[in-house]
Image: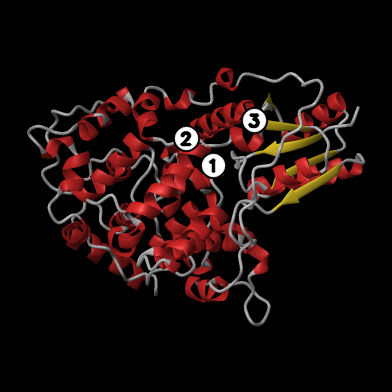
Amino acid sequence: MTPPVIYWTRRDFRLSDNPALVAACASGAPVIPVFVCDEVVEGLGAAPKWRLGLGAEAFAARLDEAGSRLVCRRGPALEVIRALVAETGATAVHWNRLYDPDSRRRDEAVKAALKADGIAAVSHAGHLVHEPWTVETGTGGFYKVYTPFWKAVRGRDVAAPLAVPRLRAPEQWPPGDDIAGWGLGAAMDRGADVVRPHCVIGEAGAQGRLGAFVVNRIGAYAEDRDRLDVDGTSGLSENLTHGEISARTCWHAGMRAMEEGKAGAETFLKELIWRDFAYHLVHHTPHITTRNWREEWEAFPWNTDADHPHVQAWQRGRTGMAIVDAAMREMYVTGRMHNRARMLVASYLTKHLLTHWKIGMDWFADCLVDWDPASNAMGWQWSAGSGPDATPYFRVFNPETQAEKFDPLGRYRRAWVAELSSRPPDTATSYFAAIPRGWGMAAGDPYPRAPVVDAAEGRRRALDAYETRGF
């Protein structure tokens, strides 16, 4: 009997272009794919944890089709992996690297312990286009601004995606749990039934999504991606987050489209590299996920009360600023939010409402099915002005003029805010079926007659606060 090797899957729910899985299979040994509901998974917010579970279930089905299976266990990662090694006699464990602080702490501890046990522990590059430490400035440092980062990598060769490997099954499988029994969606409550139809789960769905985008929308992507009333984005953030498609696969699809003369392809490639840039920063400055990246912002007088009435109005889509409320409701119904809308709601919370960006970041971390630790942290700090490559602190998005520019006919607002229409669409009314009953909201409620903070007052308050603090 040949001892098996373990493939530990975390956010790489795919068979194609999966370096860790390919390496495990290349050993010639039987491969045991494993998913662990560990300390990192347990710490996720409601929507991310639920969506991760759905991704794992879809991957399990994909493995079954390939003549393999996914062994699921719950508990601290090191304990579970060690137990599986002891049960199976596995000689090696392979996984694809993650870069956020929590995952790095876990992975470093697992790797050190397994090596001390005499087990080969091998991590691979599979989550990004470029590993964070492979991009350096001319002086050997790291990049703090996106544009030079993009210029440094745009001409680099990117290896072709790896083919699906042939998985050799062990003669005997170790026992595992039923993921459905873990209750990973418990915190979603009734919202799960509302959000589920808006998700595209699994490798086949992700590849279909990429294909449809390249054929139908990538040409106009540079212009349409900012339009709130147009389906102009790829929608792939959900699938990239869970590794249902690789960033490298998306990169090569974008390169082919650019070679074919499709105008928006380069902008799409830049967005993939923006994701790399977020992880580049998290790798070199991990504090970006928990505190102000620019130290001088530690003294800024943010509101830090998450129960403040203005914060609750923002969370519930009841600020009276229709474009902001539409975006917040879109997130509660679909688990995602248009990127332009993310900038608007972040600016409104941090500048008009002078509320700490971490309150918004944490709310997103509970509500987004495409939650990404690096992109979420960098996006919020970019909008607040406290982060790298930030919009100038004195630039305050005007929600009203932004709505006129990116939702000129009000279609986006009417699609998500039921109170704005006499006959609201299902997208708008389904919000009330998803929210906690304790919020006491209904479609027939009158809409706020005025914003909690209007555009002009919010700008004045923000600029006054910056001037007072000497910014």
Residue drawn 51% across and 71% down? 150
The single residue placed furthest to the bottom in the displayed view is 138
User: Could you tell me if the residues under marks 1 and 3 are in contact, i.e. CB atoms within 8 Å?
Assistant: no
Q: Nearer the viewer, mark 2 or mark 3?
A: 3
The single residue placed furthest to the front in the displayed view is 260
Q: Which residue is mark 3?
A: 66
Vertical placement of residue 379 versus 114, above or below: below
Horizontal side of residue 239 vs 63, given as left or right: left
Residue drawn 71% across and 37% down? 166
Disc number placed over residue 201 in the picture, else none = 2
Quadrant housing residue 209: top left
Residue drawn 37% across and 22% down? 190
Tell me where residue 407 appears, x and y as whole percent.
19, 54
Q: Which residue is mark 1?
A: 244
| Labels 1 and 3: the sequence-earlier one | 3
Inspect the image, locate mark 2, and give the three-letter code of the amino acid beneath it.
Ile
Inspect the image, locate mark 1, and give the three-letter code of the amino acid beneath it.
Glu
Residue sitting nearer the eye, 303 or 282? 282
Tell me where residue 288 appears, x and y as whole percent.
55, 58
